[in-house]
Amino acid sequence: MSEHNTQREEWSIADAERTYGVSSWGGGYFKIGDNGNIHVIPDTDHKDMSIDFDALIQEIRDEKIQFPVVIRFHDVLRSQVVSLNEAFNEVIKEASYTGKYNGVYPIKVNQMREVVEEIVDAGEPYDFGLEAGSKPELLAVLAYNTNVNALTILNGYKDDEFLKLALLGRKLGRKVVVVIEKYSELTALVRISKQLNIEPIIGIRSKMQSKGMGRWQGSSGEKAKFGLTVSEVIKSARYLESEGLGHTLKLLHFHIGSQLPEIRAIKDAVNEAGRIYVELHKMGFKLEYVDVGGGLGIDYDGSHSTSDSSRNYSLTEYVADVVYGLKDVCDLENVPHPNIVSESGRAITAHHSCVITEVVGEIKPEGAEIDTTETDSEHFLLKYMRELYTSLPSDTNSQTINYQEAYNDAVQWKEQASQAFKLGVIGLEEFGKIETLYWKITRQVQAYYKLQEFVPDDMQELDFSISSQYLCNFSIFQSVVDSWAIDQLLPVAPVIGLNREPVKHCSLVDITCDSDGKIDQFVVEHAVSGLLPMPELREGEKCYLGIFLTGAYQDVMGDMHNLFGRLNEVHVFSHDDDPEDFYIEEVINGSTVEQVLTIMQYHPSAMAIDVKRAIDKQVSSGAIKPREGVRWTDFYEACLSGYTYLKTD
Ligand SMILES: *Cc1c(COP(=O)(O)O)cnc(C)c1O
């Protein structure tokens, strides 16, 4: 935050853009509008359509939906599916590549039924399929991936039941590919296929030498959890051949990790897989597909770099590297180009949802101010502190005093006062006055340094140590778990009123009773900062904060820490004829208190009876009036059936 010594120009939308980087991380879907509110451009082919967050929040409030909410933009989801497929189709055409693109969506990234349905629907013209990594996911995929031309890819460890379900899919006429993760799965699959007399389609996951880099680089290399080594791949192919099933080996799979920040890793892996494919072909195993897994990254911090929260390549670059990489290896050995499968989950879902929470309070480090008027026989530390404070000129531009020295004195006296208090030398009231004066001095010192060109290091720290925390009505553990668990940087910005200069610099805390429940890493002015510029909170004015790109993984991975449950969800569709360019198609209610208690084995209806009984007892004894007793009973029950978050309206 370089706000020192500048005769500040009028704050503009360009300044807001520079501060929050909305266009850098927005992927074309988010921008700051001329009125200073964040807008969503739900369909990048129809840039004239734009949804103002102010109008959307107004409608959510009119519908009496409580915050925090998850907002899903279904058009964004569709648009991402189309972009990915079109990108592959275009490059395939341009490269005269003879294989096709047959992508799948790995549902583990976001299994919400509405999300999966939308992706399947948008992917229909492209025969876009689904991937499942567990038995429950496979049960869902069998019901939803009904297009017989689309692939169903099965990863993850499998038992006999899982394999049998895959063969049920074959019976339904679907292209279900069982990807072998470890050798014993292959013998089990052959045994069950022969028992049921159903021919499988088999894929093999190769353990790659190429390292993924980034946070999930453990997904590749010799120590990887999944996949077969080269010798196991050969052994598997030969085994299938000996069982008369060599022709069922159709796909070679790899996945070197999610959120790959570095394009080189992708090129390397594609080349390595291409080589294995070509060699298997020369051995007589005519595979039809190479599956390049997931890993296509998202530029969460907008830096377009190799940082863990970014990527140093574009979608087109990624696609070109996959297509040309495979083409080059095949052409060299005159082997037909395989069809290309990719399993991009994060890239498809991340942009489509965001969390909107309300800032409900400010936690200042100094707490409250008390009257510091002089009284008789004060302790000398209090006297010193007051004298120091009154000696500071009211004009912070004044050069007549050494502010650093003043600050050092204040820090030292406050420490001494704290010792003196603990020893019983200073009373509570006096210590309170010393604290108040200390914070007043600190604020003055900070105000002075804000106007200076040169700021000593420890004075720069001052910005952080005297910053406020904004209390937001949500739980990090439920809504942005990646920020807590893996330090994922996520774009955070106020969604309304960015045409006013944000004068507060603060960190964010949630309403859980957990000191980990905070966000203190933001991308501000293209750099990582511990503080986020925010507007001042004003009485009677709401302050809504958006946490963006939350659609992948954390949308479905949140937990119920402190019994805060799932959020209310608002599903938004764009509509050209609507004056606001959108309509709310569906509202999914978040968890009620009753629901989260039930998951924890409580019996809410029995609890209500117990509490009513206790109230009745107080009524009989005369401690509560009968009418009042009824109201308390109703109140308890209403809270049980209510939302788990703070009620703010
Ligand atoms: C998780 C996973 C994916 C999805 O990866 P993204 O980086 O989210 O695209 C794809 N394939 C496999 C095998 C996975 O385990």
Image (cartoon, rainbow, N blue to C red):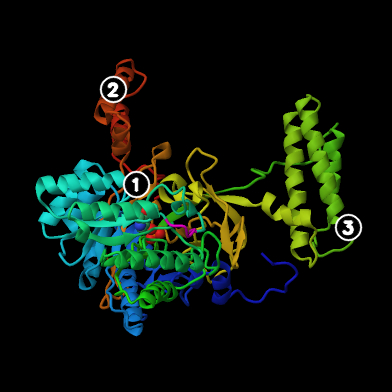
- Looking at this view, is 518 or 496 the one in front? 518
Whether the residues at callouts 3 and 2 have beta carbons within 8 Å, the answer is: no
Q: Secondary structure at mark 2?
A: helix
The residue wearing badge 3 is 401
Q: Quadrant of the N terminus?
A: bottom right
Relative to residue 95, is residue 415 depicted above or below?
above
Mark yes or no: residue 598 visible. yes
The answer for how far apart the CA atoms under marks 3 and 1 are is 55 Å
Q: Nearer the viewer, residue 428 or 81?
A: 81
Disc 3 residue type (three-letter): Ile
Question: Label 2: how many residues lie within 10 Å, few (<14), some (14-19) or many (20+)?
Answer: few
Q: Amino acid at mark 1?
A: Arg
- The circle on residue 566 is 1
Dot 3 or dot 2: first in sequence order is: 3
Residue at figure coordinates x 72%, y 36% from the top left: 432
Magenta stretch: dominant secondary structure: loop
Q: Closer to the camera: disc 1 or disc 2?
A: 1
Q: Secondary structure at mark 1?
A: loop
User: Mark 2 — residue?
Assistant: 610
Q: Residue at x 55, y 67 (%)?
A: 305
Q: CA distance from mark 3 to mark 2?
A: 67 Å
Label whose residue precedes the other's in the sequence (3 or 1): 3
Relative to 196, does residue 92 appear above or below in the rendering? below
Q: What range is drawn magenta here? A: 208-212
Q: Residues within 10 Å of mark 1 (few under 14, many from 20)?
A: many
